[in-house]
Amino acid sequence: MKKRVLRAILRDLRPYGAYLAITLLSAVIVVAGQILVPYFAGKAVDCIPLSGREVDFSALRRALLGIGISLAFSAVFQWVLGVSNNAIAYRVLSDLRTRSFCKLSKLPLRTIDSRPFGDISNAVVGDAEQFADGLLLGFTQLFTGVLTIAGVLGIMLFLRWEIALVVFCITPLSLFAARFISKHTYGAFRRQTETRADETAFADEMIGNLKTVKAFTREEQNERIFEEKNAALQKASLTAVFFSSTTNPVTRFVNALVYAAVALAGGLFVLSTGGMFSVGSLTTFLFYANQYTKPFNEISEVVTEFQNALACAGRIYALLGEEEESSDEGLLELGHAEGAVSLDKVRFSYDPERELIKDFDLDVRPGMRVAIVGPTGCGKTTLVNLLMRFYDVDGGSVSVDGKDVRTVTRASLRRNLGMVLQDTWLKTGTVRENLCMGNPDCTEEEMVEAAKAAKAHAFITRLPKGYDTVLSREGVLSEGQKQLLCIARVMLCRPPMLILDEATSNIDTRTEKLVQEAFAALMRGRTCFVVAHRLSTVENADLILVMDSGKIVERGTHLELLEKNGAYAELYRAQFVSP
Amino acid sequence: MKQLFDCLKRYRIEAILSPLFKLFEAGMELLVPIVVARIIDVGVKNADKGYILHAVLLLAAFAAAGLAFALTAQYFAARAAVGTGAELRRRLFSKLQSFSFSQIDEMGTASMLTRMTSDVQQVQTGVNMTLRLFLRSPVVVFGATAMAFVVDAKAALVFAAVIPLLALVVFAVMAACIPRYRAVQEKLDSIYLSTREALTGARVLRAFRMEGEEEENFSKKSSALRAAQTAVGRISALTNPLTFLLINLAVIALIYAGALRVEAGALGQGEVVALYNYLSLILVELIKFANLIVTVTKAVSCANRIGAVLSLEGERETLLPPEEEDPSAPAVSFENVSFTYEGGSAPALSRIDFSVERGETVGILGGTGSGKTTLISLLFRFYTATEGKVKVCGADTKSIPVKELRRKIGYVPQKAVLFRGTIASNLRWGKEDATEEELLHAASVAQAADILEAKGGLGGTVEQEGRNLSGGQRQRLTIARALAGDPDILVLDDASSALDYATDARLRAALGAEGRTVFFVSQRVAAVMHADKIVVLDDGKIAGMGTHTELMETCGLYREIYRSQTEAEA
């Protein structure tokens, strides 16, 4: 799993090869400079006598010049390194974010319907962000770290291989410690991520439906539940945060030991080699002892950061790897449909264990008005899902104009179907943007005309900025007004087929009458599926489908069905004739 | 920030101990260069191997003590930081729940959730790092400087020159970054909103083939965010090279000055090395400090945004002195009630005056914007009447604790929402300790028994917002949820709109048999015409009141509505 994620990350880094090269090159220069500074400093110290002799100022100036040059290069390229790294990290982040967002529209609705929204949106935003932070930190430190270790080791071997060996033997201790710690923190970080997702999903649900929460005075219970989740998160976080923060002190401890060992060995060498190994070299060594182990610190820091970033990346790539809807590529364009719809032996269920629709046959000629009635939960909404191809059938087929809907592109299919769902949904944006959603090229006149036809024009003009008023998620509009906008939105598209899902239930009766008229005009000559309860709709329908438990139990016209005196007649008496 | 400190205060012991132990650790580090200087100037100079060995053992002891101090400090810092984070989240959640609907609308759920998740996370990291480093770094820097002055005051003047310069660099970078981080965060909020919409609006966006456009918009937003992030990164990337440059220029100056001092006989070689080591120590510490500054500036802007939410005034309950309930009083009465929304120019309701006897069914009829929802909101005291009194069982709702009031009234919202959990856990919203029998009874009255059957009984799973149920199923379950609390008064806010007539009729019959006071709020005559009393609202005023028959005679508007509907249906 970790390997797969790493591979995916590397693949996504590939387009930034040029930046990577700059980063690498800068890292080499930075590290070389950083290593040379203490080397020259040691040389400079050697120009100062331990006792009694005169200072060699010309050698000292040369050594100090060496420091200056190394320093200048190192500083400039440090900045280049940082900038180049940012470029990589933020570009990869932006790519990932956009890709995972684009992925959302390719996910089957089945997937979206079955996940808490918060989980998915967290992956796209929060996780991506944390992943970039880890990547950013990781890149700089990993490159420079490894280079520093190699470089310092080389120069130490060159100066005095015996002491280098001492350093080399003790240092791996910090690596072991770091590995041990990171292995234990990965699980803790994952637990932290999971508990956090759970808490976020809960908060999302409750704050999003505050009215219901308040009506049931659930605030206190909610706080209690939240506190439980919060305590679990706190516990998981404490473990993750504490253990990951032990890496630093432990590696620092190993450093200090290395430092002491170098001081001992160096001191003894100065004595035994009689000036061959100078105090200046010892100074250089002591500095290196620090510099050599510091990258180990940083690498272990990076490793913990990486754990976190990997856990986040894991979820992003899981989202990206999520199975997509079958591709539209190579499918035909439906064009402007006549509006003939047929369902042939359709079998469908949301839950594989419970069959919902089976052997569903239906033939609708262009322009026919089909009313669907039946008890609540009889499967009417499912019909919308299938006609719009939000879900695919498990067996049989749905065809428009004789073409199986799976053989034409979804976009061309949906262009032919206007939909007004029971749940009104408007996007954050202006009224205009919402209205023109399905027909972005429409003229101002067309838009206003559609709004007028849907009786929405009057209230829109009363909004603070008219058609340019921005609607936020919960917004200022009443349910009824939202519904009017949804109707206007479809009116503007004039599709050959309509699906109306109890569309008018939230509009006041006086307006509703007018909307009905507008709808009647809109429906003329168009194939319509109306999930509605109005008697007039049912009476005027060319075909009534009476559904129960996902199956059509009766079909026919109003009069035919009344004559039949079956399920419809019973329903009719219960619904439309006052008791 | 005030809020943050307030939360941190709960962990004051940890917050004091952590930096304290960090200081001990720093102290251990500050002693090291002195010991090294002694190794050179005493051990090496006198060729005293024993001295060197002792000094090195001392170094190892410092290291061990440093480790112990550091681990202790890390633990306390983690406790304080994580605890503060948890406390902030708790307060945020509780605050968010106390907000009025208009406040929620104004802020948007998405950005509030960002406050609670990523902002708190940043603050937590900030607190953790601050406790660990914020005191330690300056102490190391100034400690190293002080030690340098002890070693040699004249050579140490280099320290005095370079440290203000370093401080200047660090603060200049910080000042440039803070406002830019804020801009980054705003862009991040908007990205989150788009993502949520892509999920909540998946059906509509797909139906209108908006996927491409949404993707394009998102991609633009994402690029803008990237640009903002890169801009900040470019500035903050200056910190490390600049500090590195300054410190090493100081090294050059120091060694040169040291050489002069040695020649003057005032200083030993080992002491020059010690001074050099102190500068290195400062460099290492400053790099950490610069990283800390980045973390802290991010954390501060996050903390400020959290603080802004926390300092908003939520709804506050102000209670009048309790009033006696009067068993003979009407179940609900509106006495000359008017209400104007905050910032509204015209009253949403004016002079509403009617009463409902116990056990009566009432229809509230009116079109969109007629004031139905407002009227119900006043009954629940989601809002408080601007004028007049709303009474429940004879007591002014202003004198009844909100919790008690809302327990008396069962609410079935227009938008049928259920919550992640089981059917039982949803029904228990009405009454937390309801028995299974009570739940089953409520479900059967609400015509929801068949849902239980289909979903595997009370333990059946309900997904977020009840997405695994159809609209009608959700609606019936929300009715069952309200009934489970056995409320005296039941309010159905246009609640049968997703039900078919047959189910609706059975529901009405079952509710009627229960003998509760029931409000049917609707725009349809059919939904209210059988009520004992119908209140017709128009433009925030009562346009008529009475039974169906009475209204047909007396109320022109009612007749009009009735006709428009029956004409359409008959």
Image: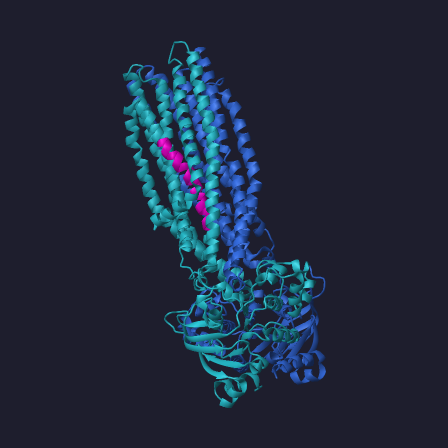
Q: Is residue B502 above or below residue B429?
A: below
Question: How far from the left and from the top, in percent, is residue A11?
Answer: 39, 46
Q: Colour of chain B?
A: blue
Q: Residue furthest top?
A: A53
What residue is rendered at 41% in x and 49% in y?
A: A313
Q: Is residue A251 visible?
A: yes
Secondary structure mostly taken by the magenta-highlighted segment of the chain = helix
Using the rendered image of the protein, determine whether residue B83 is visible from the camera's viewpoint: no
Which of the image's four quarters has the C terminus of chain A?
bottom right
Identify the coloring: by chain
Name the quadrant containing residue A164. top left
Q: How many marks?
A: 0
Span shown in magenta? A125-149
Residue A23 counted in the magenta span: no
Residue B35, how many percent across, how many down? 37, 23
Q: Nearer the viewer, residue B536 or A520?
A: A520
Residue A131 part of the magenta-drawn span: yes
Chain ID, cyan in image: A
Instruction: Choose top left, top right, bottom left or bottom right for residue B52.
Output: top left
For the residue pair A87 and B124, the one nearer the viewer reads as: A87
Of residues B308 and A197, which is closer to you in this image? A197
Quadrant of res A138: top left
* Image coords of residue A468 (percent x, y): 65, 58
Residue A379, percent from left and from top: 46, 75
Residue B291's place in the image compared with B189, above or below, is above
